[in-house]
Image (cartoon, rainbow, N blue to C red):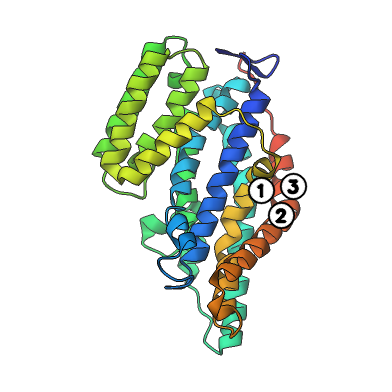
Amino acid sequence: MRVDYRAGMISSSTSVSNRLHHVDALRGLAALSVCLFHLTTARPGFPADGSLLKAVCQFGYLGVEVFFIISGFIIPVALSKSRYQIVNFPQFLAKRVIRIDPPYFAAAGLSLLLFWLASIYKGTPFSVQPAALLAHIGYLNDFLGLPWLVPIFWTLAIEFQYYLFIAVFFSLLSLPDPKISLAFCLVFLLIGLLTSYSRILFYYAPLFACGFLCYLKIQGKLNNKWLCLLLCLDFLAVYHKMGLASALASVVASALILFWFVKNDILIFLGKISYSIYLIHIPVGTRVVNVLSVTPFFRDHGHLVILLALIVTLVAAYGFYRMIERPSIRLSQKIVYKRAP
């Protein structure tokens, strides 16, 4: 299986557009699972502990692991398709910043606004640390020991570190000699096993490496035997670092990336707005839960509250996508890579 750059297709019975659609669907599932995890844990004991909804959604945090695996796969695919070279690093970084940062800053501003409104409603002082706000600009909060406006922003810091890393070392992953690509993956994986600080990219190397191996498979650099062997090694590394649930999530995500060719329009739509869902589900969705859960009627209808909070979150995310994220996407697409002589 090889990538045909001129046609923009992966040569096999499956086109790259279908693959990207199914990866979009997987991204939509990941965003939905993270959203439901936070909605069902926003208030202790609500919905009731032991309920089926609570039992299922308690594993929704694994959507973060799936996002990292998807990034490990889809960014190399995009770089290959665009024939990225290291001389294109400034353009790549500009595209990523324009694509990611405006929605990120808008979500931070929305959180500030809601904090302020909540302080007025409760009659409590409104205060934020200026240093913590400024640290958001460079995703530096964890390194400086400062709080995030929205807790899940730490994952964006990991993603941004990954963008810098892959932009510099992509050539090692894309060289014609598969031995160099495999050596790169193994060294990356080894560094991950030796890293204990959980707020830097290398701690999550086993997850991103899953995506790398899926990429090498569709590039024709891995046969099935080597793919199974290396993925098993990778799954063991994920298990060692993050536990059984994360290892199982990486198995499922890798299998879906490589073998799931179903096209589902609802999941594809969720995938399209997944970044917006991810950014605002805590400031918007969890507030809906917090407000409704203390009202007399909804207090005993936890499942209904979660459903309403989810609907409000999805509607708000779609509006956020249309007003903030989509313009950023279009602006980033105007930046093209300059070819080296």
Per the model, the C-alpha gap separating discs 2 and 3 is: 13 Å
Measuring from the top left, give residue 293's x and y in whole percent.
55, 78
Q: Is residue 111 visible?
A: no
> How many numbered marks does the figure carry?
3
Q: Which residue is mark 2?
A: 318
Q: Which residue is mark 1?
A: 273
Q: Compare marks 2 and 3 and give the one earlier in the sequence.
A: 2
Q: Compare marks 1 and 3 and give the one earlier in the sequence.
A: 1
Measuring from the top left, give residue 119's x and y in whole percent.
56, 83
Kind of residue at badge 1: Ile
Measuring from the top left, give residue 309's x and y in whole percent.
61, 66
Circle 2 SS class: helix
- Mark 2 Cα within 10 Å, few/some/many (few <14, many 20+)? many
Q: Which residue is mark 3?
A: 327
Kind of residue at badge 2: Tyr
Q: Is residue 294 above or below residue 263?
A: below
Circle 3 SS class: helix
Circle 1 SS class: loop
- Mark 3 Cα within 10 Å, few/some/many (few <14, many 20+)? some
Choose mark 2 or mark 3, whichever is in front.
2
Measuring from the top left, give residue 161's x and y in whole percent.
45, 42
Q: Is residue 264 visible?
A: yes
- Looking at the image, do the residues carrying marks 1 and 2 touch, with CB atoms under 8 Å apart? yes
Q: Is residue 80 above or below residue 194?
A: above
Q: Residue at x 56, y 49 (%)?
A: 31
Residue 254 vs residue 297, the one in the foreground: 297
Q: Residue at x 55, y 24 (%)?
A: 87
Per the model, the C-alpha gap separating discs 1 and 3 is: 13 Å
Residue 326 vs residue 33, the one in the foreground: 33
Indicate left or right for 253 with 295 as reference.
left
Residue with the most extreme top position: 177
